[in-house]
Each structure stands twice: as C-alpha cells, then as structure tokens.
Image (cartoon, rainbow, N blue to C red):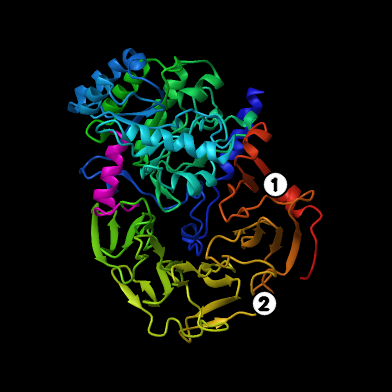
Amino acid sequence: MRALRVILSAALIVSLAAPGLSVDGNRLTYLDDPSNPYWVGLDLPKLTTPQWIGEPGVELAIVLAMDDVRATAPVQPFLSPIVERLKKIDGRAPLSLMTNRLDPQDPLAQAWLKNGTTFEAHTYDHPCPLLGGTFEQAKETYDRCVDLLASVPGARPVAFRMPCYDSRNTVSPRFYTEIFSRTTPQGHFCELCSSVFCVFSAGDPSLPSALLIDEEGRPRFSKYILTERRFVNMVDSYPYPYVIARLCWQIPPIMPDDCVGKYLTRPADPNTVRDMKAAIDATAAKQGIYTLCFHPHGWVTDAQVVDLIDHATTRHAGKVRFLSFRDVRDRLTEHLLGGQPLRRANGQDNGVRVLDLNADGFMDVVIGNPEVRQTRLWSPESHTWTVLDFPAQLITVDAENNSRDAGVRFGVLLPDGKTSFLVRNESAAGLWHFDGSTWVQEPAGLEGLRLKSAVVTSAGGRDRGVRFRDLDGDGQCEVVVANPQESGTFAWSAASRRWERLPFALPTGTTIVDARGGDAGLRFVDIDADGRADVVFSNADRYSADLFTSMEKGWSRRILAGEQGKTGALPPVVRDDGSNNGVWFARRHLWVQNEDTGTAFPFHVDSRSFEDDFLAGRKKTSD
C-alpha cells in the first residue's frame, strides 16, 4: 500500500507541472473566479519574500504556527524551549497559536503577547470537517472563536486555520465566500488563512533533485499526500502568499507537517524532521514563506522544533526572518500594498488586486478605491517598487458604506502579454493597455462593443457578466458577455482598432451572472483537454456541459444536460439562495465540499471525473 501511495502521489504532483503557453491569454482569469482556493501553481507568477518583507537581504520568511490551543498552561512546557530559542534571535517569540478557546483574563496570554506571540482563530469547537453539520453551526463556531479572541486585550486575531486541513478534505470555496468573507456578529474578521498545503513537485525545475528526492529514492514531499483518503487540499510548488475571494491572504503551510508525518511513519520521526529541513531549504531557494503547522500532541517534540530553528538560522544566516501571522499581515499591507489592506475597516472589498502586469513572472499590485488609485510595479532586478497612477476605481462605496464592484475587467490583448483592462459603468468607460511603464488608453477602445445596447461591465454596482477569455488559444483574449438580458462574444481587431462581434454566444440556458449580478453557476473549464475553454453550468434547477468546437460555432457540442435531483446530475455551483456551493475544478475532476458532502462521503468530498462522468457517452448536438 505504501509503495502504491508513493507512485500515485508522485504521478499526481508531476501532472500538475505541465508547461504553459509562452503567452498565456488566460493568465488573469483567476481574478474573475475569486472563490477558487487552488488557482495557483508551479507556473504562476511569484510573490517572493523580498517583495513584501521590507528588509534588504531577507529572502526567507518563517512562521511557526501551532494548532489546537485551548489554554496556555497545558502547552507552556512544550512551548518554553521554542520561545527561548526564538528570543535569542531578536528578543522576540513570534509564534502564532491557532486557538480554539482562551480565557480573556489569562495572565500568561498577556505575557506571551508582549513577546510577539499571537493568538489566531481555529474555530471554537474544532469540528472535522467544519462544513459537516449545518451551515449555521459552521459559521457559529467560526464566529464565536474570532469574537472570543478579539475580547482578549491586544489579541484580535488576523489569521485562521481550518481544523484538520492537513489530513482531511475540510477546505471549501463555500467557506471562503460565505464565512471567511463575512463579518462576525460583533463585526470582526480575519485577513489571512493558512489552510491549503503547498507540496513541492518532483517536476519543479527550480529545485535540485537532492531536495526533491529523499535518501530512500522516493519523492520527498508528495509521499506524504494521504492518497488513501483521496486528499486534494493542496497546491503545487507555490510557497508564496496569494489571494482568495479578494479578501483573504492564503499563506500555504508547507508539506510535511507533524500530522501527516505520523500517518506516513510514526510520531516525532526524525525522517519527518529531515524532510521539514529540506522543505525549509526548498522554500528559501524559491524565496518564499515557510509555514510550519505543528501540534502539542507529541507528533513532534519541542527539541525537534528548536532543531528546525537552528537549521534555518545556520543554513540561511542573514537571509531569514521569523514572523507571526500578524507580522506577515502588517508587512504585506505596508510594503506590498502601500498601506492599503485587502479589507476595508468594515471587512469589505478595498479595491486591491494582485496580478502580474507586465508578464515578467512576478506579481504586481493595482489599487482603486475612493481614496487611492495606484499601480505598484515590482522590479526583480533592483528589488524596488515603482508607484504609478491607476486610471480607474475598482470599487465604489455607496451611501450605506458598502463596497460595490465597479466592473473593471483585466485581460490580455497585447502580443507581448502585458495587461489590459476594460470598464464601462456610470462614471468610467474605456479600454487601457499597460505598456510597461504607464497605462495608455485606447482612443476608441469600446467601439463595436454592443449587443441590444452598449455593453456595460457594471450597472448600479451589479456585475453585468463581462469577462475576458482567450477562446482560441492564440494568447489574446476575446470578450464574453452573458447576463439574463443579453449574450455575445467579441474579438479585438488590432488592425481596425475596434471590437468585432463573433458569430456565437454562450450555450442556450447559460449565463455568467444572474439578475442581481451574482454568480449564476457558470465555469470555463477545459473538459476534453484540447487547450480551449469549455462551459460547465450548474445551478439549483439545471445543469449542462458544452464543448468549444471552433471560432465559427463556439460551444456547439452539448455533452451533458438535465435537471437537478435526477440521477447523474452535476452538483450545483450555486445554491438556490445564490450562495456558493463549494465547487471547484482540479486534476480533471469537478470537486465539491460543503455541509452536504462533509458527512455523506467518507473523505468529505464528492467529485465527477471528466473522462467518466463528462466525456463517456458524450452527446453530439452539432459539430
């Protein structure tokens, strides 16, 4: 069984590392799929530690984050040697304790806070999975924990970790959109999450084989994947912060942690610590952030954690900084985002987007809110930020102080892969291209973009279903429009400098947004692996899947269709109340994790295989 696990896990991880196009026209489409926790990977632009750490010469950040804290006294003996070792570095003990419960009057907690330790949220009841009972129970245990910690003087949490993220499929898009992105009854919210494993791929060309293959000749990191549990909560070789649902910084914990180590061999196995050291070195080589998840249950000893600290400070002397999650939040906000957090004071969207503007492989930033409109361009050569203007607002704020989407859509229209954006709302209209140093407006950038009337990207703060998408794989995006009133597709003509309407629209019965401007349940997915985006649509009433055939006929081959509630139906992407249902697409499967799958399935997820459930016995409506 263990040999089979190694073979399967190696194949799984290597399969994620396929090279992309030299100019990827769809490299920015993740900005329009904000609920997907797994959109990053080996070939995605990096957000390296020098971009946000704020200290010249520091290339590696380390967060030591211990789970399952319910009181300080029981864990003090275990933590004391770790605290004392950290203090020898810079006089602080920047640990992050993922906490279920804490007495607001605990005197030891105040002493730890003064040392730089933080208490972060881990739910009040530690349910595994969180979405396993009712949705109301899931939100209540999250909210109760966050509000409790916020009542401890000086301990307002900024980060969250999902219970059992490392051994079970407990993470879901539904959690990020419907729980994390909301506020608690007392108005509190978190800004970071550390719940999606980063697994270094055996196919990562930036790392030496000595780090990727262990001393026994096995894939060093993917051997820990619990394939017998159908474990899918991971991203490939991306040890960097990234944004989920526009409001959440994901700080991936690095595989292995002590929990998966005990499953592979035994608790506190020296070989697991050996592999943790290799993971630190791999993260350093990629200039990332190494987050260690560990527990006070004997799965790793305090001496072993101290040994990891010694390894990092010796091997990477002068280049490493130990931080708490609060430190990470503060430095990301100050040095990367220029003082503008992802979330406004009321917890809503602050109009901050992280994207690679000039296609150089490094993330940049644009900010567009009523106070700041700014472009922040990173230079990997000089390790400096250049600050420029940004021509539009990404959000507006209404009379009730609520953030409203302004309808700015990013895509790739230029042959060199640099970023363009399109907007048409009540106060702004136009098409702009980034030329590497400034934004240049296309003089007639909206010419031809018309269906029943002029296409708008946002109306009254409601999304009107306009998306950039490279449909034919030529490295340049088309525009797809689909709302309940109209549907169509357009291509940009570089020769005539205008939009030209294409002879097809989205398949019948599908739309990108509903009448309220909310997610209607449509996803672009390459089902048949031909490099072109097919369409999967699934809401509370019906579902369908249509293959893209050509730039003349569009999505003309319907392979699935039916009504919900019948055998073989696809899980809804959105529920009848418009909320996210927890669906994502990865590894040639549709996956869903929510309060319905949490207890109904042994590994907490339901899935549909592209080969077996989408393509087998495919229908043929036209060619």
Which residue is denoted by mark 2 in the rendering? 552
Give the label on residue 517, or none: none
Q: Nearer the viewer, residue 486 or 135?
A: 135
Quadrant in which residue 425 is drawn? bottom left
- Residue 201 seen in render: no
Q: Nearer the viewer, residue 549 or 422?
A: 422
Q: Position of residue 420 (x, y in %)?
A: 41, 70
> Which amino acid type is marked by label 2?
Glu
In this view, the residue farthest toward the bottom is 496
- Magenta run includes residue 583: no
Q: Position of residue 189 (x, y in %)?
A: 37, 43
Q: Quadrant of the C terminus?
A: bottom right
Q: Residue at x 28, y 49 (%)?
A: 333
Q: Nearer the viewer, residue 192 or 558?
A: 192
In the picture, measured across the screen, residue 261 lies left or right of residue 281, that is right
Q: Quadrant of the N terminus?
A: top right
Q: Secondary structure at mark 2?
A: loop
Q: Position of residue 430 (x, y in %)?
A: 40, 78
Q: Count all numbered tags in the image, as a single digit.
A: 2
Quadrant in which residue 478 is drawn? bottom right
Q: Earlier in the sequence, mark 2 or mark 1?
A: 2
In the picture, measured across the screen, residue 409 lies left or right of residue 572, that is left
Quadrant in which residue 547 is drawn? bottom right
Tell me: residue 118, above or below residue 566: above
Q: Which residues are magenta?
A: 323-344
Q: Position of residue 6 (x, y in %)?
A: 60, 29
Which residue is denoted by mark 1 in the rendering? 608
